[in-house]
Structure formats: C-alpha cells, structure tokens
Image (spheres, coloured by chain):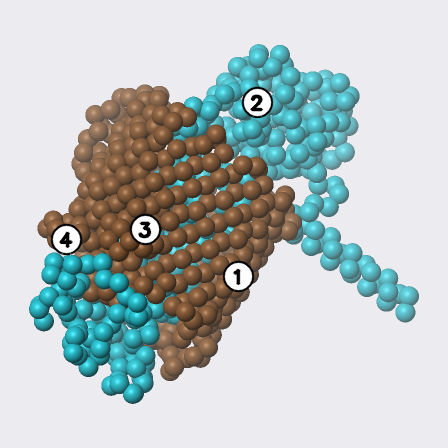
Amino acid sequence: MKNRLSLLLFALLLLASACAGVLGIRPPGRHPFEHRAHVTKGVQCTKCHTGIASAGDEGPLHLPDTAGCMADGCHVKPHDTNTCSNCHGIAGTRIAAADARENLHFSHDNHLKRTKGDCVKCHVDVQQGADHLRPSMGTCFGCHNHSEEMVVRKCDGCHVDLQKEHIKPQEQWVHGPDFTRSHGAAAATSGEVCSSCHAEKFCSGCHAGRVAPATPAQLAFDDPFAPSVHRAGFMSRHPDEARGQPGLCISCHLTSSCNDCHFRRNVGATSEGKSPHPKGWLGLPGQPNDHGREAWRDPTICASCHGGEGEKLCVGCHRVGGIGGSPHPPGYVAHGDRNTDVACRKCHGGGL
Amino acid sequence: MLALALGLTLATASGTASAQYRLRGDVYAFGTAPSPVGLFVLNGQAKPTDWADAEAVVWLGTGYQSPDPNTTGDVLVANIRLREPHGYGDLRLGRMLVSAGAIRPFQMDGASALGRIPHGPTVQVFGGVPVLPGFAAQAYDWAAGGRAAQRVAEYASLGVAYLQRRSEGRIAFEELGFDASTSPVKWLDAAGEVAVDLLHADVSSARGSLALRFGPARIEAYAIRRTPSHILPATSLFAAIGDVPSTLGGLSFSLRAAPRLDVWASGSADSIGGELGGRAQANATLRLDDRGDGAVGFELRRQWAPNGSWTGGRGMARIPIVYGLRASAEIEVVIPDEPDGRGSAWPWGIISLGYSPSFARWLDLAGGVEASASPTKLASVAAVFRASATWEKKR
C-alpha cells in the first residue's frame, strides 16, 4: 500500500513537472543567464560583451562564447565540454537579440557614451533576472521624447520596417484572442495606429473580399491559427451564421456575391439546382408563410439573391391592393419621395 | 496605377539609405472537383524614399470565390502614398481601402488626403469610384467624404466622419459617423462608434466596448446594434421593408493562464428582430515553444438563433518538425440543431505540410489535403498546394 502511494506521488510529481514545462513555467535549472551573480562579483558588462561599447548599427551581436567565458581564467574548469550557452541562459534571449539587431536602428556606441557606461540604465530587467533583455519602448521614452513622431506615426527612426518586423504591441491583449470581433471599434478611432504595422493588403484581404480571389483562411491554409472570420468549415455553416448576425455579411460583401456563388455552384433559385428556401416559405394568407418574418429580420439576405431586377418579385404581391399587402411594418414612416426615390417608385410611382 | 507606382519606384531607385523593396509571388493550385483552379498572386511593396511608398497586390487565374468564372484576374490593392517628410500629411492615389471612423470601410479607385497637426486635429478627405469586381464599371457611381478627429489630452480621441455614395447618379448612402475612444488609465480602455443613416434619419449601426485589464487578464463588455435595412443602399427596394434592428450585448474574458497558455471565453445575448438568440465561445491555445512556432488549440462554439442554432468544436495544431519542415492540422465538427435534410453533422478537416529550406529562406512550399461533408456535398476531398518566393532588398 505504501509502495503504491509512493508510486502515485512520484507519477503526480512527474506529471506536474511535465505540465510546468509544457505550460512554460520553467523547472529549476532552466533559468535566465546569471547576470546578477556576475555583476555582484564585480564583473563589468563589457568584460563579457567585448566590443559592445563601440558597436554600431550593424555587425556582430557581442554575445560571449565559451572562449570568452574561459578568458582571463574566469571559468578555468568547465564542468562539461558543451558550449556554455547551451545550458546557461535561454535560447530565446539570443534569438531576441538577433531580431533586435535586424529590425531596429540602434547603436550601443552612441548610448553608452550618454549613460556613461551604465548598461542597467536601459537594461533595467537584468537586475530582476529577466529572460527578455530588450528594453521596452517605455524605457526608451524615459530619455527620448518622440511625442511628435508618435502623433504623425513616423516610426522609421528606430524601426527598420514595422510591417516586416511583425512585432505585436507590448500590451499583449491589444491583439487578444477575440480581436477579430473587437477590432472594428478600435480601428474606427485609431486606424492610423493599425497602419503603422499593417500594410493595406492585410485589411483588404477581408474588407475588399469582393475582388479577392480567396479568403485569407484559404490562402493561409497551412496556418490554422491565422486570424480569419471564415475559418475552417465556414462554407457549411454560413447560412446559420448569417441568420445569427443580421447585416454582418454585407459589411464586406456585395449583396450580389451570394447569388454569384450560388449560381456558380448550382445551388439556389436562379440556378437549376434546388431552392434554398425550406417548406412553408411562401404561401397564401392563412398558410405557412415564413418569408416575411425572415425578410424583416435581415433584408440583406433577401437582397443577396433578389437584388436588382429581382426586387420586382416582391412587388408582384406586396403592392397597394396586392395579395401580399403592405410590406411596411406598423408605425413605418416614409422618408423617401414616392415620385423620385427608386425604392418607393417601384410600388407607389406607377412603375408597375 | 501599378505602372505609376513602378515608375515612381524606378525613378527614385537611387534614393535614400532607407530604401526598401519587397516582391512576393504565390502560386496556388486548388485541386477541387469538378474544376481544379490555379492562382498566381503577386504582392509588391516599395519604399524608395522617405516620402513615397507604393503597394500592390494583383492576382491572375481563377480563385475559389471569383465572382465570375470568367474573371481571370483583379487588383486588390494598387496605390502610391506620398508623405510630407515630417509626417504631417500624406496623399494616397490609386486603388485603396478607405477606412474613416464609424463609416464602414470600402474599396475605391481614387484619392485620399490626410493632414495632421501635432496636438491638433487630423483631417481626412477622400473621393473616387467604388470598386466593382472584374474591372467592371457603372456610370455615375462615386463616393466622397471625410473625417475630422481630435485627440484630447493624449487620453482620448473623438472623430466625426461623413460619406455620400451615389449609384447610377442616384444617392445610395449618406451617412454621418461618430467615433470615440479613451484609455485614461493603463487598465481601462473604451471605444464606441455610431453611424447614422441621413437618408432615413436613423441609426444604421452602433458599437461600443469597455475593457478592463488586470495583469494577464482582460474583461470586455460590448454591445452592437445593426439595422440591416439601413445598411442596404437606399436604391434597394428592400430598404423599404422597415427597420427591424438586431441588438446584442456580451462579455469576453481572456487570460494568459501560463506563459504559454492563453484561454478566452465570450458570450452574448442577442435580440434578432425581436426574437432571442445568443452565442458562446471558449478557446484555449497552448504554444509549444517560447516563440510560438508550434502551438495546439481547441475551440468550442454554440450559437442560438431563430432557425440557425448550431454547436461546433474545432481543434488545431501547428508543429515545426525539423530543418524547416512543419506540419499543421485543423479539424472541425458542426452539429446543427435543425438539420432539415442537410445532414446531422458537418465535419471538415485539413492536414498540411510546409517546407522553408534553411539554405533558401526566400522559398516556401506548402501542400495539404482538405476533406469535408457539408449540406450540399455528402463528401468532398480537395488538394491544395502553394509555392511562394520572396525577393527583398534593403539599402
């Protein structure tokens, strides 16, 4: 019994360790490089990061290698033959440094002169043992006043090419997981901020879908995490999605786009395929007659097939003295001119 | 316009030290039955000087959703942007997406000018011809409008926009939009917009959002109101059906539960033309490495709507394998409440392999197989392939 309990505890411990690793909660032993330990022993930053004080906008990263660690007898007896950085420090830190070199206009040479050699003035997180050493923009703004550049979105003084850099804002939830739904309100007031990083093709992929050859999800078929409102089997569920969000579809699509596609795929009233309308859709007074309710709920869906000349289909019944009666709801107030406005004239202007 | 953009690029090719050029070509082959389709997408960006840049996306072939089977190409974006060197204004010419506050974004061939005064208002004016697919044109179609916006004490922004669109000379839309956003403290942000249909003196759409952030968590309350009849052009007979708005209010909660694990859930209650509906969604994404190159995710969705309720689950995975080889898979099953002879479940899935060789980063290849059962097809299998090449130069 005792053995079983021990075995169970051991298994749970193993599972917890595995979960912690998978979730990114690192187990002891994998931690950022021991910068603090080196500094408290009096090792200057430039002793390991040789050449950093004169480093310009290009060139090597000035990260120490094994030979550098062993120079001057600092680490004379390495405990194994592997490269030091394999275990000491996190690979992501070096990758982030390489990304920063490629995507930022930055010179350590200029900055170290002004900070009088104090690296921690910018790399504030080093003291806390952080694994991401690139200073935040907030740290930059501690000295640099870029308020005018921010207003006019002139970012290329520091960022080589934001559209290519593809970096997310530091505040992760600016582009949170539900951003596809919520981006509209933010973009309405801050569209210029969006264009700091996104090329126009990014927005046009969805909002100009009427001239796009395929949806963004179809083009990025190999990335299931790419954001798209038409993800996965959207084609199967699109009528039901449309019923749940009246008016949403024509935010991006022409009303005729439904009919164009249905016609091509031989599905719909205008093709030779079956009608998309269910039983009880159209009937005489007193019979099942669902089309009126659906039309009031979302006339854009009707217009998607019956737009243009097809609108006359309605007027055949819904006209003054017609069998369908008035299509206007109770309390309807007419704003148009029945003699000049196209929508009114079809019934009231003697056009039919 | 593309020629103009190219000409500008070449004319200033000996420009400044920050000149950047990028050209990407994607070739797609969709092996769909009964008619396989091919597609070539050419995507170019150029920034020859600090004061000019150009962008173009054109496609040739036949796409999945080509509005006309005879359409063999179109232009998604093709414009040049001339900027005042300090950023106080810019002028865009060509085919562009116009986004101006609460006015719905639309695509046009024309011009858009923007003027910015630091700490003062930003003014945008635009005008042109709304884009129709397949280079089609309709006489006397045009759109014009503008937006003025003002930041308030760096914590808020207010804007007002106007749009008039005409179709065959007749007025189709006349809208006035108001937008506002604020973030007075780091943990709070709010945004809202209202578009008013001036032709019928009514609200055509409105949207609001209030979000609170606490460390790794974010809670958002949102509300949306749409009146579909006002979203239709005034020239449509259906605009006379009346005003039956749909309104929804909801909550969204997202949390970075662990360094590599994001979870979020969202739920809303809707009034759809006076009938009740709603939506609920939960999603979890686990990154398999610090950079997020590999990830797995799962999503559950439920929609309640008159004659359109369904439940769905989706799983997705993106896994780097070795030496630039990667695999991905996505699977979804949707179960409608009322099948109505459309099948009791609609499964859909795709598996794909991608390869970007380390010795030729400019090249990317991907291929996949998609299979589904839908209301219109008992079973469907399609193969898809993409080859991409990118050329870029930075000086």
The answer to which image quadrant residue A49 occupies is: top right
Q: For numbered disc 2, what is the local secondary structure?
A: loop
Q: What residue type is labelled 2?
A: Gly
Q: Which amino acid does label 3 sit on?
A: Val
Q: For numbered disc 4, what is the local secondary structure?
A: strand
Residue at 68% x, 50% y is A21
Q: Position of residue B180 (x, y in %)?
A: 42, 42
Q: Where is residue B130 in the image (x, y as percent from the top left)?
A: 20, 48
Tell me whether marks 3 and 2 sit on the same chain: no
How many angstroms separate mark 1 from mark 2 (CA)? 40 Å
Instruction: Name the residue that disc number 1 marks.
Output: B267
Q: Position of residue B70 (x, y in %)?
A: 17, 60
Tell me whether marks 3 and 4 sit on the same chain: yes
How many angstroms separate mark 1 from mark 3 (CA)? 27 Å
Which of discs 1 and 2 lies nearer the camera? The answer is: 1
**Any mark on residue B197, and which?**
none
Display colour for chain A: cyan
What subunit carries mark 1? B
Instruction: Name the residue that disc number 2 marks.
Output: A142
Which of discs 1 and 3 lies nearer the camera? The answer is: 3
Q: Where is residue A170 in the image (x, y as percent from the top left)?
A: 54, 37
Instruction: Name the residue that disc number 4 marks.
Output: B170
Q: Left of A58 or right of it: where is B259?
A: right
Residue furthest to the right = A2
How many angstroms separate mark 4 from mark 2 (CA)? 56 Å
Q: What residue type is labelled 1?
A: Gly
Q: What residue type is labelled 4?
A: Arg
